[in-house]
Image (spheres, rainbow, N blue to C red):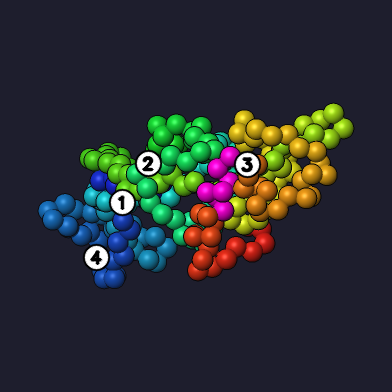
Amino acid sequence: MVARRQVDYMHESVYALQVTNPHARRIEIAGTAFEIIPANGKPRVDVPLHEFCHRKIDAVVHQDALKRNLKTARMQGYIDRYKAVERNQLDVEGTIPPQLPFNAAVQMVKAKLAAEPIDAHSIEADTLEFTTAHLYFRPVFAFEYAWNNKLGVIEIDGLTGEVVENGEWFREKVEIAMSRDMLFELGAEVASAVVPGSGYAVKLLNKVTQDKPATGTS
């Protein structure tokens, strides 16, 4: 999400004006007289001013829609590295809906911009504009397994190949529980048949990585 805050404000300040004439005892600026301050051999006058300022504050905020604690660099890496296709509506079997409301994401951006200090004595205008708001979906393969009377979920990032052994967000989407040994026998075709929507994810992965294939972890 990209937003910009623009602020018009007035700041009161005092400018120290050096006086180069050694014989001057007082100066006048726009009809206002100022006594010269000796200042240890560097005579000056202090002139109070009103500074009328305009400031632009930009914010680029990445939020994980499943409320996980993912680093900004990792999320931006997805955007920079992989091609995305824009859609007005996404209707794919197995897709997990965002759990972070849009209004909540907006409030996070507003809080970030509001936290930026403005050294002002008065504010004439303070506007906020959201220029970009995108929601990205990425393919993830999820497998639930049973081992020693315990259930676990393994997630495989369909773009980077990264494996998360303690997955949890996709548990509600897994329909078949497998043994630990079965996981090592799974191939791409089996995974496509087992995980709802993963066949689409494989096709999507081929499409978005045709220019630059995914290797390693993020």
Between discs 1 and 2, the one toward the N terminus: 1
Q: Position of residue 211 (x, y in %)?
A: 50, 69
Q: Please name whichever residue, 60 or 172, is drawn nearer the observer in this view of the structure.
A: 172
Q: Secondary structure at mark 1?
A: strand
Dot 1 corresponds to which residue?
Answer: 55
Q: Residues within 10 Å of mark 4 (few under 14, many from 20)?
A: few
Residue 172 at x, y percent in the picture: 62, 30
The residue beneath circle 3 is 195
Query: Closer to us: mark 4 or mark 2?
Result: 2
Circle number at residue 89: 2
Amino acid residing under circle 1? Arg
Gap in Å between the C-alphas at discs 3 and 1? 51 Å
196 drawn magenta: yes
Q: What's the magenta region?
A: 195-202
Q: Amino acid at mark 4?
A: Ala
Question: Which tag, 3 or 1, sits closer to the chain's start?
Answer: 1
Whole-Å distance between the Cαs marked 2 and 3?
22 Å
Q: Secondary structure at mark 4?
A: loop
Residue at point 64% right, 64% down? 215
Which residue corresponds to mark 4? Answer: 24
At 24% from the left and 40% from the top, the residue drawn is 125
Residue at (45, 31) in percent of width and height: 101
